[in-house]
């Protein structure tokens, strides 16, 4: 999860020259959306899962864990490509 979130910062830095600061998930997702709309959807999924896992008494399902893993993998790969082109 944290790798995907950090990868989102890399994508923003590579495309926009800066990344989101602070704890506002909506702002971070919106900023990433300016660089890569697909990546923003993956970040939103990760942040939703992070909120559920960290602040809820409801356990995440196996499908949610899989979805979060796929989202993180996609973001990390996009960050690798973005970094390689800078």
Image: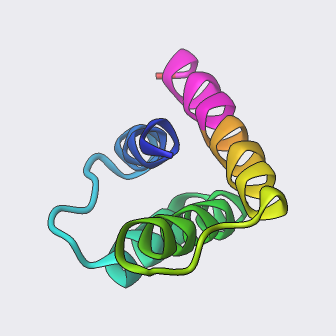
Displayed quadrant of residue 39: bottom right
Q: Is residue 12 left or right of residue 82?
A: left
Q: Nearer the viewer, residue 52 or 41?
A: 52
Furthest residue toward right:
63
Residue 18, horizontal then vertical, whole percent: 25, 50
Q: Residue at x 42, y 42 (%)?
A: 2
> Is 81 part of what is drawn in magenta?
yes
Choose between 1 and 27: the one closer to the eye. Answer: 1
> Picture coordinates of residue 14 (x, y %)?
42, 38
Q: What residue lies at 65% left-to-right and 67% top-to-bottom?
A: 60
**Majority secondary structure in the magenta region:** helix
Is 44 drawn above or below residue 26 in the view shown?
above
The extreme top residue here reads 84
At x 64%, y 25%, the residue is 81
- Nearest the viewer among 49 and 62 is 62
Above or below, comparing residue 67 to residue 28 in the picture: above
Instruction: Identify the residue at horizontal 80%, vertical 56% (top origin).
Output: 62
Front-lying residue, 17 or 66: 66
Number of marks in the image? Answer: 0
Q: On the image, which quarter does residue 46 sit in?
A: bottom right
Q: Horizontal and vertical percent for residue 66?
A: 80, 50
Q: Is residue 40 above or below residue 82?
A: below
Whole-percent x, y for residue 36 in the image: 62, 59
Residue, far left: 22
- Bounds of the magenta segment: 76-85
């Amino acid at each position: 999860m944290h790798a995907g979130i950090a990868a989102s910062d890399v994508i923003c830095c590579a495309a926009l020259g800066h990344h989101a600061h602070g704890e506002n998930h909506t702002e971070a997702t919106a900023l990433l959306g300016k660089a890569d709309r697909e990546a923003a959807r993956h970040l939103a999924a990760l942040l939703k899962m992070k909120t559920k896992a960290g602040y809820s008494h409801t356990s995440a399902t196996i499908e949610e864990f899989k979805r979060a893993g796929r989202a993180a993998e996609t973001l990390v790969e996009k960050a690798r490509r973005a970094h390689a082109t800078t």
